[in-house]
Image: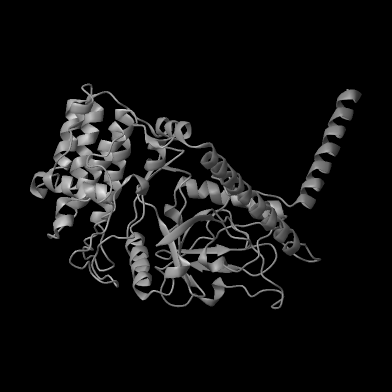
Amino acid sequence: MAQVWAASPESGGGLARTVALKVVRPELAEDVEYSRLFIDEATIAASIHHPNVCETYELGRHEKTLFMAMEWVAGESLAGLLRMKRQLVPLEFQHAARIVSDACAGLHAAHEAVDSDGQHLGVIHRDVSPPNVLVSVHGQVKVSDFGVAKARYQLHERTRTGEVKGKFGYLAPEQITGKKSDRRVDIYALGCVLYVATLGLRPFGSGPEAMSKILMSKYKRPRELNPEFPEDLEAIIVKALSPDQEHRYSTAEEMRNELERWLLNGGYAVTASELGRVVKERMSRQASKGIQQLLSINRMAPNAAFQMLMHTEERTATPTAGNVGVHSSDEHTETPTAGSGLVAQPPGLRGIVPVTDEELTLRTRPAKTGDRRVIIEPEDGPTMVLESNRGRGRLPQEYVVPPHNPRAPVQSSVRRVEVSSAPPDRRSERHRSQRSRSLLPIAPAHLNTVLLVLVILLAFAVVLLALR
């Protein structure tokens, strides 16, 4: 009903990334029922957020064409990994178990999805098959394509009598007979996926003739085809393919736990990097080339965005005469670190332009008992009184010194302000030492005078010693 493309924005800058763009086929674009089905798919997929489910970003319409922007997976479908020159070549047992286990995690998240009110959506995928299980070159497994999924509040028509949705070789018996179905139809399909991934054969074949075999549960067990097939892994497949849904795993999470237990007991630690290596080895050259081209574009996008940002900053950060606190573009884009000296500005100083430490000397004055006030007295400009939430009423007039020039902009900077509510005679030694240090700094002009006096006294002392 749709085509899927790898797509990226033509322009716009920013850190744009490649997406999978699903577009309704032109001949179906004006069909109301297909449009509703497409919207339902996007709505269901957008309600599921899990690392093992393809993310849906946007649903939109361009003129008369509906489209859906989804997560692009840099890899191959499980069907593509199994197919080698028109035949199915199975994976190693542990690799197949890892892929199906991760797919179980994604499907369980879909089955447990809820709406904005916390109501269970009752999602059933109904099309779990190797083409809809994607594996990336980084070893990530994603369940995709909720095109025929079932859920509450759908717009399209319910499945009519005699209508079957899904691929013939992966249908559960209740889907064929029209009985009430639930999430366990997906578990049945997972059993078929694990079967074909480990043996390279579909348990019931393909096409309409597979439906009669499914109803009779007529298939060869894995150990009949391969005597070396692990017995515990066969038991998982057989339970998932039980014709009676009551005898299957009740949830996909339960099936996943069985697979993880088998991997653990067998000593198979299948990492994402190992699975990614398998994907790269089995991927076709054409698919691998296309993926590498798209990954190269994605690697170039951040650099292009950075250059655009720097160019914009250079144009907007040109200093003018009289400006204070203008930084270069490098300083604008520098990432703050733990030792960068950034401090939280007190509420009373918001909106004040910062100046350098040499242009300001701070000192604090004792506050009255029970008050939490700090008096900031710069060399130039007004004295400011900061008051905490505990303060009540207006401050006495003697605490506020009016500025020398009311029209002059207030400039101040605070590195650290010690606030105390204790009386002056009960202050800690730490507060006294900090207050005393705040009074010690000497202006640069006075420092030169002091140094000159010291040099003269030292020279005088040398002369006296020489005369003796």
- Residue 131 in percent (x, y) is at 37, 47
Vertical order, 162 against 145 (above or below) = below
Which of 260 and 24 lies nearest the eye of the viewer?
24
User: Residue drawn 43% across and 61% down?
Assistant: 2
Q: How was the colour assigned to the protein in this rendering? A: one colour
In the image, is 207 to the left or to the right of 12?
left
Q: Nearer the viewer, residue 94 or 309?
A: 94
Position of the N terminus, as image quadrant, is bottom left
Residue 65 vs 134, above or below: the answer is below
Q: Is residue 156 left or right of residue 72?
A: left
* Numbered marks: total: 0
**Res. 418 visible in picture:** no
Which residue is outermost to the right? 467
Q: Quadrant of residue 191?
A: top left
Expressed as whole percent of the image width and height from the top left, the position of residue 287 reads: 52, 42
The percent coordinates of residue 38 (x first, y second) are 37, 66
Answer yes or no: is residue 398 visible: yes
- Quadrant where the C terminus sits is top right
Q: Residue at x 23, y 59 (%)?
A: 164
Q: Nearer the viewer, residue 79 or 145?
A: 79
Residue 76 vertical placement versus 426 (above, below): above
Q: Is residue 124 above or below residue 83?
A: below
Q: Nearer the viewer, residue 347 or 298?
A: 298
| Residue 423 placement (x, y as % from top left) | 42, 59
